[in-house]
Image (cartoon, rainbow, N blue to C red):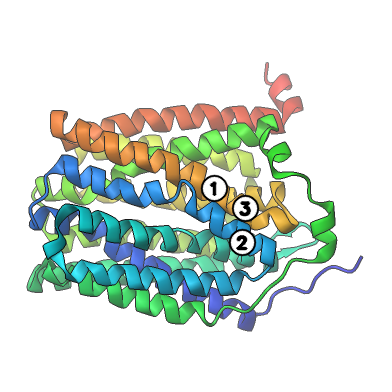
Amino acid sequence: MPKPPIATTRELIPFAALSAAYFSHIGVVNTFLSLWLKEIGYGVALIGLIASIQSFSRLAAPYAWAWLGDRTGQRALMLRIATVLALLGSLGFFWQGGGFWWLIACLLFMYLNSSALMPMSESALAQIVTRGGVFDVRRHGRVRLWGSLGFMVTVLGAGAFFENFGLKYFPIAVTLGLLLLTLSAYSIPDIRENAAHEKSSQPIWHTLRQPAVAWFFGTIALNVLSHMGLYVFFSLYCDELGYSKTMIGTLWAAAVITEIAWFYTQGRWLPRFSLTAWLIIAALASVLRFGLTAGMGDVLWVLFAAQTLHAISFAANHTVCTALISHHFPGNMRGRGQALYTVLGYGIPGVLGSWAGGLISEAYGLRSVFWITTGVAVLATLCAIKVWRLQHPKQATSNH
């Protein structure tokens, strides 16, 4: 069977644009939602509960959308519908007279649709950068870095804007970001899986029952859970320590700059170790990162150093997970495999992390959240070691 042609730069540009638009939207929401909620009168425990809605939406919505994409083969159409619906959901933020439950409903509707975007776009991207069963990490990184650039520019720009003009403009920023995302979704080409791949696919639950795959998802879940303290409470933590909104945006940007550097050069570094070894390295980077954040967060240069570890704790881990999922869930399982990454990685851990983190921070302070995430990262490391042992049984035996 001839190998599929390598994706051209022209074919990858729409994915780069979508990635940039999506992570620009994430940059606004994940960085400033908690500060906006604080400004309109919500306490830390309620902010944690509200923030968990994003993760709650990931329990089922990504898999449902991915199932539709895999079933119909029309992933581009599903992306377009999802972005339009998310945009409509964001319009509800402009009416704050509805109170708490109206806010919950608007956020839930927006997240139910926006949470499906990355699994579907990542599965389509993985399809065109995979040749002969080999995932091209270099091309994947060159696309994904545009998402990081979009995030960084937005965080810096929004941080400075909100510092000068106030967080009352937060709903406008969210809607404008989703409008840009909707326009980007219409540029994605309609890509279908090769029929030969569809015939060779195994039942998805059969794959999930394999020990190496099960422990792999355990690693994903724990690593993401360790990062939930960052996603939900980092801005609040920095604000409590006395950093300005501009500095908070700069700290987020520092993480993303190293993330961009990683995605641009990952084709050079990833081949040096196996994918499962990189899982261990990423988990260890998480341990160091959150330990520094908890122990020395009031020392600015240490906090900057901790943020640079984002290149490994998140970026390297994300690429490795995407490659391993593309390997374990090929063909017409690809979209659902990426959706499981979102559901089991960002859904369940996200709900638990946001909800529990809010309660813990209310009782023991925001710093305690980062000590706990450090311990969770240790557990992620142990799971990653188990995955490596299952994938390299001969080497694991020889080490004993």
Q: Tags 3 and 2 in contact by the CB under 8 Å rule?
A: no
Crowding around mark 3 (Cα neighbors within 10 Å: few <14, some 14 to 19, many 20+) is many
Q: Is residue 293 among what the camera can see?
A: yes
Q: Nearer the viewer, mark 3 or mark 2?
A: 2
Quickly name the residue at label 1. Answer: 341
Which residue is situated farthest in the right direction here? 1
Residue at disc 3, secondary structure: helix
In the image, what residue type sits under mark 2? Leu
Work out how far the residue at label 3 is from the one at label 2, CA to CA, in angstroms: 9 Å
Q: Is residue 130 left or right of residue 283?
A: right
- Which residue shows up at 43% across the image and 53% down it? 311
Residue at disc 2, secondary structure: helix
Quadrant location, the N terminus: bottom right
Measured as percent of width and height from the top left, residue 18 is found at: 48, 74
Which disc is residue 68 wearing? 2
Of residue 381 and residue 65, the one placed in the foreground of this image is: 65
Quarter of the image where one finds residue 7: bottom right
Q: Is residue 208 left or right of residue 290?
A: right
- Which residue shows up at 41% across the image and 39% down it? 349
Q: Nearer the viewer, mark 1 or mark 3?
A: 3
Quarter of the image where one finds residue 48: top left
Work out how far the residue at label 2 is from the one at label 1, CA to CA, in angstroms: 17 Å
Work out how far the residue at label 1 is from the one at label 3, CA to CA, in angstroms: 9 Å
Q: Is residue 34 above or below residue 365?
A: below
**First reached walking from the N terminus: tag 2 or tag 1:** 2
Q: Is residue 309 among what the camera can see?
A: no
Of residue 215 and residue 76, the one placed in the foreground of this image is: 76
